[in-house]
Amino acid sequence: MSLERCALLLRAVNVGGTNRVPMAELRARLNEHGGFGAVTTYIASGNVICDTPADPVAACAEVRTLIHDAFGVDTPVILRTHDDLVRALEENPFPDAAQDKMLHAMFLEGEPLPTAIETLTPRLQPGERIALRGTDLWIDYGSGGVQSTKLTRPVLDRALGVAGTARNLLTVRKLADLTGA
């Protein structure tokens, strides 16, 4: 019997030269630390693939502390199991999105505020769409892309009431594949 794999998603690391967390070094530290099975990473944006821990909340806090102590970066760590990722893909509210790289799933640390969509809707740019599916906020940035949105991290954090980290649809598909292996 094999353990279920999961993705530990780090928020805003290795972006524009800030919050630098070398994935090879993190992978090595987590493998040395133990308790996560054979740890791998996917691309530099903070995707750690490991065995699903018995206590996900404690494991996320432990990894967050390890990253802070080793690299001086304080970043939320959000866990999604293989089943969570598959379910997110199945519940994609925008299968008609023009480009997979412009469609993002923002994985949240917990339940968002009940007023989140109502608060965010007036900030949408033409062509943008949003939808909540449990603790996943889907954002279709449309042809304008992320660079023209008014849905900035501070705006999203305030409206949602919880931290989150986004991955484009291509990355979500890859993470589902990697955690299913």
Image: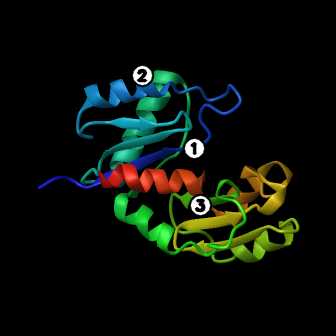
Between the C-alphas of marks 2 and 1, the distance is 17 Å
144, above or below 97, in the image: above
Helix, strand or loop status at disc 2: helix
Residue, disc 3? 105
Whole-percent x, y for residue 98 in the image: 72, 65
Left or right: where does residue 48 sit relative to residue 165?
left
Q: Which amino acid does label 3 sit on?
A: Ala
Under circle 3, the secondary element is: strand
- Label placed on residue 25: 2
Q: Is residue 47 above or below residue 135?
A: above
Q: Count all numbered tags in the image, as a single digit.
A: 3
Residue type (three-letter) at the residue carrying disc 1:
Arg
Residue sitting nearer the eye, 61 or 90: 90
Residue 179 in picture, x, y percent from top left: 35, 52
At 68% from the left and 25% from the top, the residue drawn is 17
Is there a contact, CB below 8 Å, between mark 2 and mark 1?
no
Q: Is residue 174 above or below residue 70?
A: below
Please tell me which of labels 2 and 1 falls first in the chain.
1
Sequence order check: which comes first, mark 3 or mark 2?
2
- State the CA–CA distance, disc 3 to disc 2: 27 Å
Sequence order check: which comes first, mark 1 or mark 3?
1
Taking the image as shown, residue 87 lies to the left or right of residue 113, namely left
Question: Residue sitting at 50 percent across and 67 percent down?
Answer: 89
Asked whether 33 or 126 is in front, the reply is 126
Mark carried by residue 11: 1
Name which quarter of the figure residue 168 lies in: bottom right
